[in-house]
Amino acid sequence: MASEAVPADIDEQGALFRSLTAGRRLIIMLDNAVSAAQVRPLLPGHGSSLVVVTSRRRLTGLAVDGASFLMLGPLEESAAVDLLDRMLGSARTGAEPRAARSLAELCGCLPLALCTSAARLSTRENWPISRVVDELADERGRLAALGSLGEDDDGESSVRSVLEVTYRHLPADSARLYRLLSVHPGSDFDLRAAAAVIDAEKEPTARGLEALADANLIEEEPEGRYRFHDLTRLHARAVAEEEETATERERAFERLLEHSLTIAVAADRLIIPGRWHLGRHYEHDPVVVFADNVKAMEWLESELPNCADLITAAHERGLHRGAWELCEALWGFFIHRKHYATWMRTHEIGVAAAAAAGNPRAEARMLVALASAHLNRRDFPEAERRAGRALELEVGGGHARGEAAALECLGVTRLGLGDVPGAVASFSRALGVQRDIGLERGVAMMHRRLGEAMARLDRTEEAIDHLNEALVYFDGQRDHYNRARTLIGMAGVLTAQDRLGEAAATLTTASKAAEQAGARHEQGNVQLALADLAHRAGDPDAERTRLERAAAVFDELEAPQAIEVHARLAELDRSSDLGGHG
């Protein structure tokens, strides 16, 4: 058709195109479309044609035209390495397999970034793949390193330029949200966190998140969560540094930190009720109300990686108070769910943050929490060192409540080291301090601890008296976690007295309390106590069943008790084999 026969009007052009293509079998590829309106004039007339449209945006308007949508995310790592292999040759990638995988990871398995990096390498045969890996290793220079292909390239194919085009088409509010979300140090976020970052209500924030997801600048996850791709996060951070003041970026981070801290505090109040705290948010009404302690722990479980990243980032930014306060809010959760490595890593930072803030009481609180983590890992010498330092700080500062907490921790450490009389002395001293300051919960805790210590000394009647004193308080407070701990201790004493029926009933109650508390570790301890009971009763089959259940829990939690339980199972197997050959 002659060019003069093509009408000037776009609608007339579309009508002409449809008439010319009607009834024909065509495959039409429309690449990098900006909008549904841009696509519609190029849709053919009726017939068995296929139109494939690619776009950086979600062209939801094409749904009315009968479009089906396929979201393409980054490649799997194996596919990303295969792409590098095809572009660079198997000999080259085979010579540096680790570097090839690192390159795929640093490119976020994004085809454009992979192709850009591979194109640079393909024209530089003497460059090892590791050279480009080294260039991309620095986050701040990664986008620049993923720039144009070379001197003859116009730069439009670089990752930065592609993201820049998409970003510049955002509405102003969505662009600001994109920039300030880059201060979030964690892997993902929800609507409430995003609203906190920009200090806005949920409704406009939700619209902004939808606009960013439509532009594929953030990824929408299940259950209302979102995440950046690694490279879009770097781009968002770069444009934030260019267009937002340092003060505004800092305020955005502080809002995010306070948001997470206040919700963590609300959750912690339910997890271990009645516990004393130093953080300022415990003085106010909770900002959210969880249905129960299990829901509170579910929130903390889902947000733990973000909270850990926030603690690190807050300390690095000099926000030391927020760092140690968030650690304090997580302590109760760690007691229930363990997560040993994260517990110790965050609380090492908590100790440093409290010291940097010049707050010896907070430093002592963090030291006791860190000592507790080492106790759970059965590193008793390290726990003793940390608890001893905490006691020095608390006594030096005249802080009786903190002194009692440090003494309790030292007592548990001495139990672990086999110094039971020393443990009794620490618990008794702590009990006196708690009575002097009138803390009923602290008194109950020391009765529980003394009951456990007296049982180790075979002073069973004294042990039962102490444990009953503790149980009265924890029953009244509906403190399911400490009820479970106390009942497990009581069952051990009853088993030692051959009161096996009472011990079994007590462990049934303890199991229910542990379940109500959401305390998996204590559920494992219940199974271990039931195994002891079965051993006492001479029932190896029941003992094995209980040990297997305990092992499943401790293996899941990566708890050190797993080693002991598996050793007992192996011993049972050996005994069974010997019996069978006898």
Image (cartoon, rainbow, N blue to C red):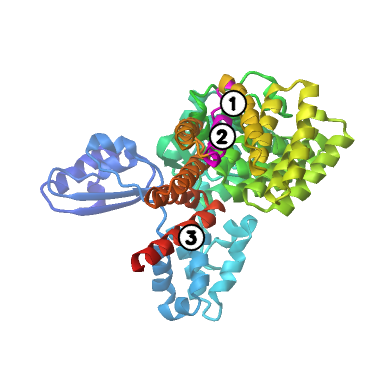
User: Distance of mark 3 from mark 1, alpha carbons?
Assistant: 62 Å
Magenta stretch bounds: 477-497
* Callout count: 3
Camera-near label (2 vs 3) is 2
Residue drawn at x 70%, y 31% is 446
Which residue occupies the foreground of this view, 293 or 31? 293
Q: Residue at image x 62%, y 47%?
A: 376
* Quarter occupied by the C terminus: bottom left
- Check disc 2 and report the residue beneath it: 490
Q: Which residue is disc 1 drawn over?
A: 471
Q: Which residue in the protein does label 3 denote?
A: 113
Q: Position of residue 561 (x, y in %)?
A: 55, 52
Dots 2 and 3: beta carbons under 8 Å? no
Q: Is residue 65 left or right of residue 311?
A: left
In the structure shown, which secondary structural element does the residue marked by tag 3 occupy? helix
Residue 169 among those drawn in magenta: no
Q: Can residue 178 be seen here? A: no
Amino acid bearing label 2 = Met
Q: Considering only order in the chain, which callout, 1 or 3, is on the residue closer to the N terminus?
A: 3
Q: Residue sitting at 82 percent across and 29 percent down?
A: 400
